[in-house]
Amino acid sequence: DIQMTQSPSSVSASVGDKVTITCRANQGISSWLAWYQQKPGKTPKLLIHDATTLQSGVPSRFSGSRSGTVFTLTINNLQPEDFATYFCQQSNTFPVTFGPGTKVDTK
Amino acid sequence: QVHLVQSGAEMKKPGSSLKVTCRSSGGTFGNYGIAWLRQAPGQGLEWMGRVIPILGIPNYAQKFQDRVKITADKSTGTADMELNSLGSEDTAIYYCACEDLQKGGAFEIWGQGTLVTVSS
């Protein structure tokens, strides 16, 4: 199975901050990478697919990038509604696997 | 737009079987694949398998291969996930989700989740 790791596991930030979350795959997954946001008691919400493509309706302060097997989710100008847990997911190879998550909470 | 509605919460005994149903409010899954995932309390997301309704061929995670069955009826827009030989480790929220093959296999639409508790 492809292992996905995320760092940091948690980050404390303030409204207006820039937050960067990194996801690493232990083997090549091309750009078969998605990012999700999940709030407590809610279902995950797709933010970015194909590593860099913003899902329709998602604010442009969210962006994704790729460098080899390292993927980054950036949130610019953090808003109150952005405090949540973020997961990455690879779909290059079965089984589909997820990173363990990064919790963004208030500083 | 597809909207997924799942069957209700379940309480199960160890060793029993589980069936969770997922229905598309529009009566069709379109060209989506339907995946089943689960999330144990306070844990991350785990993919169990998926089926592409227009093809009917499932793919399973090896971890669940021997005790899961995923089916879909494209004519009615319903999908089922059956899991056998339940143990306490199967306590989780189970989700169905639409896998968009045009978006790199990302899960674009999710059901509301079904809480399954396995306890004696």
Image (spheres, grey):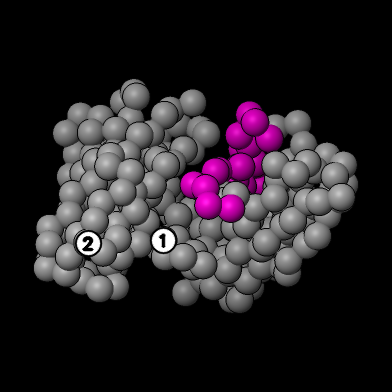
Q: Is residue A82 left or right of residue B11?
A: left
Q: Residue at 23% of width from left, 46% of height from top?
A: A21
Q: Up-down: is A6 above or below A40?
A: above
Q: Is residue A59 left or right of residue B41?
A: left
Check residue B47 for magenta coloring: yes
Q: Up-down: is A88 above or below A56?
A: above
Amino acid tagged 1: Gln
Asked if badge 2 and badge 1 are on a common chain, one would say: yes
Highlighted range, magenta:
B41-64
The residue closer to the viewer here, A39 or B48, is: A39
Check residue A105 for magenta coloring: no
Q: Residue at 58% of width from left, 53% of height from top?
A: B41
Q: What is the distance, in whole Å, between disc 2 and disc 1 at their CAs?
A: 19 Å
- How many discs mark residues in the rendered view? 2
Pick whichever of labels 2 and 1 is earlier in the sequence: 1
Q: Chain of mark 1?
A: A
Which residue carries the number 2 mark? A107
The residue closer to the viewer here, A29 or B33, is: A29
User: How would you rate the neighbour count of disc 1 (Cα within 10 Å): few for under 14, some for 14-19, many for 20 or more?
Assistant: some
Task: Point out residue B19 in the picture as x, y percentages from the top left corner.
Answer: 78, 55
Q: Residue at 78% of width from left, 62% of height from top?
A: B10
Which residue carries the number 1 mark? A38
Amino acid tagged 2: Lys
